[in-house]
Structures are given as structure tokens and as C-alpha cells.
Image: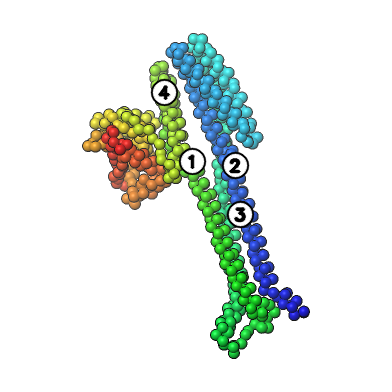
């Protein structure tokens, strides 16, 4: 009886049970730790999704709607008859509804005390402006244009500036807070990834120690015993049987063999379980990284695509300011305002297209485009005129005498593609250098050439020139996202066209676009 109790205290089964129990507890702790860290990552992402993305979108809508409301106020004063006034009043009503809806939605989002204070300042300033704006519209409707103009240029302008400034301060703070939240989420994700990698490494190291211990204290004697047993199977009865002095299951030959066989099977199952856990955590980390990349891509793409229409709006506004002192006619004012509104419409269209292009960049959907007949020469001329106004220091020469008058394609997408090429030619050229845009008809299609005398493209960069996010090695210090030429290539491929480049580093570049003739773009 004392011998049996002593054997139980040193039982291999008890030792292995303690080891695997401790190892199982470590796995449970590791799993709970991973869940806790991933939950923290999820909470940080949820804050960005449920608070900052919504807030920035609503503030962007408010900025657009309030500026449109101010423009509608001016349009009412400039309306020549009651019909135009009625249209403007309808637009004012629609904008009022949109602003009210955006304000209601914004107030439902959680905000801190500073944001609430800035929001109250904006709402008070906006209500004050609305009262003055309503008075301007009333005077205009009653035919008192002179009084309406005076009120529009004095009290209305001051009230609108106060509301716009308050909204701008709130928007800047929200964008800054959103950036901080994004940085926090990124830091949490990186810390979580590092901790999980360390934990996995620790578990692997611990597994190695456990396996070495089992091999030296259990498997080795079993293998030796198996050799003895095989010898016994060959009727070698004169062998010595070691281990008879051990106070454990190895001393009991038949049952020890069965116990260690089962333990070997259990060890194999545990190893497969560890591999499955490691694969699962690797997949989770890959999904989180993919989400982070999508958010970063969207922000960079949106900032690149919105730059041109916003610059058009700014250029037209500066032109109006310069023309104010020299006198401006109603027709000129309407023309400038229409160009501003055209840029706003183009930017609104870009928003819809950017949302769809996220799926395109992931390879999950096709970019929708709307082909129609349009005047290619007029489109290129308007593009040159736009860049002459927004970049007065550039010398843009257009050679469109032989340009085709009729083309088939999506004029908005093609305008954006040629705008990217012309913008790059100006941006990567010295101020005041010559930039040429030419268009010709050729057998089977049209030829459009954009040529500059700028920094050129290094030979090593040309192979990857049209890859997404790739930028040349010689463009440091020049702002860019690396997606402009990628989008150009996408648009041309949709139109069954192609693009080629000729460049000498330090002397300039020449981009050659070929489009099929009218009627073949959808072939």
C-alpha cells in the first residue's frame, strides 16, 4: 500500500495532467486577452464610424448647403422676372429643408462640450443670417432691388460671414478630432498586433519546452521500452528490461505502452489546435489591415479628386473680387456664378463616383460610365480655359484647329482624365514654362497630346508609371497622391483607348492618348 501511494505521487499521468491543464489555462488566458484587445480595436473603429465619419459628412453637407443658400440669395436679387424668382424661391426652400435635416442629424450624434458650444454659436449666427436673408428675398420679391442689394452687401454679408466662420471653426475642430481618433485607432491596432505576436511566440516557446520535457522524461523511455518489446516479439527473451525500478506507469509495461500511445495522440491534437488558432488570428489581423487600407485609400483619393473643382470655385471667386473694383455687369456675374455652380455640380458628381470607385479599386465591381456624343474640341478648350484661370502663371498653348468636333464617350470622365494630365504637366514644370495640348483626327480615331518642358520622368519609373500609388523618384516636395495617372489609364481603358508616354529626364514629358472614332468606344 505505501508503494502504491508513492507511485501515485510520482504518477506520469498526474504530471502530464498538470502540464496540459496549465497549458490549457494559458490558451484560455491568451484567447481572452486577444478578445479584449480586438474589442478595444473594434471600439476605436466604431467611434470613427459612428461619430467622426457621420459628423464630418454632415458638416460637409452643411458647408455646401449654406454656401448654396448664399448663392441662391444672390440669384434672387439677379432674377430678371417673377418666373426666375419663383425658381430661386423653390431652391431656397429646398436648401432650407436640407440644412434643417443636416442640423437635426448632427444633433443626434454624440459631441463633447466644446463641440456643443461651437454648434450653438453656429446655429445662433445662422438663424440671425436667415432673418436678414429672408428680408433680402422679401425686398427682392416686392421689386425693391436697390434696397435688397444694399441689405445683401451689408448686414446679410456680415451675418453670413459670422455663420460661415463659426461653421468653419467647428469643421476644423471636428476634422482634427477625427484625425486624432484615427491615429488612436491605428496605435491601438499596432499595439494589439505586437502583443498578440509576442503572446504567440511565448506559447510556441512554451510548447517547445513542454515537448522537450516530455521527450526526455517520457517518450525516450517509452521508445527504449518499445525496442525491448519488439525484441520480445522476436522471441529475444534474454534482454534486460530497464525501468522496473521506476515508481510510475512505465514500470507496468502493458499499461504504460497504452498510456503513452494515447498521450502521443493527444499531443498531436493539441499541435493541430495551436495551428488553427494561429491561422485564425492571422486572418483577423489581415482583415483589420485591409479595413485600415480602404479608409486611407478613400481619404487620399477624395482629396485628389476634389482638388480641381474646389480650385475652380476659388479661382472664380478671386476673379469676382478683382472685377468688383473695375465694375461688373449682371451678365458677367451670372457667367462667373454659373461656372462656380458648374464646379460644385462636378464635385457632387465626383462624390457619387468616388463611392463606386472603392469597389473598382478592390476588383469587385465595374465603374459605371455614361457614354454620349460630345464636342471633344470644346471640352479640351474649356479645360485649357479653366487652367488658365486657376494657374495664371502657366503658359498653356492649345492646338485644336484639327481637333474632332464629334466624339463618343463619357465627357465627365474624359474631362477628369485630361484634367489629370494637364494638371501634372503644369505641376511638374517650372512656373511660366510652356505646356501644350493638341488634338488631331487620325485614321480610326482621335489623338490627344499633352506636352510639357518640366522635370521629366526617370527611366526607372516608367514601367510602374500607371500603377496605383506609385510616384516618381524625382517628385519629392511636390504634393500628389499617386493615383492621378492610374485613374487616367482606367478611364481610357473603359473607352477602349490607350496612353503612351515619351520623356527625357530634366527636359519634359509627352503623353499621347488615342481614342477610337465616334461609334467604336463601346465596341
Query: What is the crowding at mark 1: few (fewer than 14 residues within 10 Å), some, or many (at least 20)?
Result: few
Tell me if 251 is positioned left or right of 194 in this view: right
**Residue 318 in view of the camera:** no
- Image position, residue 101 (x, y; %): 57, 27
Specify which label sits upstream in the sequence, 3 or 4. Answer: 3
- Which residue is at a point 45% across and 42% down the rendered structure image? 359
Specify which label sits upstream in the sequence, 2 or 1. Answer: 2
Q: Nearer the viewer, mark 2 or mark 3?
A: 3
The residues bearing labels 4 and 2 have C-alpha atoms spaced at a distance of 40 Å
- Which residue is at a point 33% across and 33% down the rendered structure image? 409
User: Disc 4 marks which residue?
Assistant: 338
Q: Nearer the viewer, mark 1 or mark 3?
A: 3
Specify which label sits upstream in the sequence, 1 or 4. Answer: 1
Specify which label sits upstream in the sequence, 1 or 3. Answer: 3
Q: Quadrant location of residue 32?
A: bottom right
**Residue 483 in view of the camera:** yes
Query: What is the crowding at mark 3: few (fewer than 14 residues within 10 Å), some, or many (at least 20)?
Result: some
Q: Quadrant location of residue 256?
A: bottom right
User: Disc 1 marks which residue?
Assistant: 299
User: Disc 2 marks which residue?
Assistant: 47
**Which type of secondary structure does the marked residue at label 3 adopt?**
helix
Amino acid at each position: 500500500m505505501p508503494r502504491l501511494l508513492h507511485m501515485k505521487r510520482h504518477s506520469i499521468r498526474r504530471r502530464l495532467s498538470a502540464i496540459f491543464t496549465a497549458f490549457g489555462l494559458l490558451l484560455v488566458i491568451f484567447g481572452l486577452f486577444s478578445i479584449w484587445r480586438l474589442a478595444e480595436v473594434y471600439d476605436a473603429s466604431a467611434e470613427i464610424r459612428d461619430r467622426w465619419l457621420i459628423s464630418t459628412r454632415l458638416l460637409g453637407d452643411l458647408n455646401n448647403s449654406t454656401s448654396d443658400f448664399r448663392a441662391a440669395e444672390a440669384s434672387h436679387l439677379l432674377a430678371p422676372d417673377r418666373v426666375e424668382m419663383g425658381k430661386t424661391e423653390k431652391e431656397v426652400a429646398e436648401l432650407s429643408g436640407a440644412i434643417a435635416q443636416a442640423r437635426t442629424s448632427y444633433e443626434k450624434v454624440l459631441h463633447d462640450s466644446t463641440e456643443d458650444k461651437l454648434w450653438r454659436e453656429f446655429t445662433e449666427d445662422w438663424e440671425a443670417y436667415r432673418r436678414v436673408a429672408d428680408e433680402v428675398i422679401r425686398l427682392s420679391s416686392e421689386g425693391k432691388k436697390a434696397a435688397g442689394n444694399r441689405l445683401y452687401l451689408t448686414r446679410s454679408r456680415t451675418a453670413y460671414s459670422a455663420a460661415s466662420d463659426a461653421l468653419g471653426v467647428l469643421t476644423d475642430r471636428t476634422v482634427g478630432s477625427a484625425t486624432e481618433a484615427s491615429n488612436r485607432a491605428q496605435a491601438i491596432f499596432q499595439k494589439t498586433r505586437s502583443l498578440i505576436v509576442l503572446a504567440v511566440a511565448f506559447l510556441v516557446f512554451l510548447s517547445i519546452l513542454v515537448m522537450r520535457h516530455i521527450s526526455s522524461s517520457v517518450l525516450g523511455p517509452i521508445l527504449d521500452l518499445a525496442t525491448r518489446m519488439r525484441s520480445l516479439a522476436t522471441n529475444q527473451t534474454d534482454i534486460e528490461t530497464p525501468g522496473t525500478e521506476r515508481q510510475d506507469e512505465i514500470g507496468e509495461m502493458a499499461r504504460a505502452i497504452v498510456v503513452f500511445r494515447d498521450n502521443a495522440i493527444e499531443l498531436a491534437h493539441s499541435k493541430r489546435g495551436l495551428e488553427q488558432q494561429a491561422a485564425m488570428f492571422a486572418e483577423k489581423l489581415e482583415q483589420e489591415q485591409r479595413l485600415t487600407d480602404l479608409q486611407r485609400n478613400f481619404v487620399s483619393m477624395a482629396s485628389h479628386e476634389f482638388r480641381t473643382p474646389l480650385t475652380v470655385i476659388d479661382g472664380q471667386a478671386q476673379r469676382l473680387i478683382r472685377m468688383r473694383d473695375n465694375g461688373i455687369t449682371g451678365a458677367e456675374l451670372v457667367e462667373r456664378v454659373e461656372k462656380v455652380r458648374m464646379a460644385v455640380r462636378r464635385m457632387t458628381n465626383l462624390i457619387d463616383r468616388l463611392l463606386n470607385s472603392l469597389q473598382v479599386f478592390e476588383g469587385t465591381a465595374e465603374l459605371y460610365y455614361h457614354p454620349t456624343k460630345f464636342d471633344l474640341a470644346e471640352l479640351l478648350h474649356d479645360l485649357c480655359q479653366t487652367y488658365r484661370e486657376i494657374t495664371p502663371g502657366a503658359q498653356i498653348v492649345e492646338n485644336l484647329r484639327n481637333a474632332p468636333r464629334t466624339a463618343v464617350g463619357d465627357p465627365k470622365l474624359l474631362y477628369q482624365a485630361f484634367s489629370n494630365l494637364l494638371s501634372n504637366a503644369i505641376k511638374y514644370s517650372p512656373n511660366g514654362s510652356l505646356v501644350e495640348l493638341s488634338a488631331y483626327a487620325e485614321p480610326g480615331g482621335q489623338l490627344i497630346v499633352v506636352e510639357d518642358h518640366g522635370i521629366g520622368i526617370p527611366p526607372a519609373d516608367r514601367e510602374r508609371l500607371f500603377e496605383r500609388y506609385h510616384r516618381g523618384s524625382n517628385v519629392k516636395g511636390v504634393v500628389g497622391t499617386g493615383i492621378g495617372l492610374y485613374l487616367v489609364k482606367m478611364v481610357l481603358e473603359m473607352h477602349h483607348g490607350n496612353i503612351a508616354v515619351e520623356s527625357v529626364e530634366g527636359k519634359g514629358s509627352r503623353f499621347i492618348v488615342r481614342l477610337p472614332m465616334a461609334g467604336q468606344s463601346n465596341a
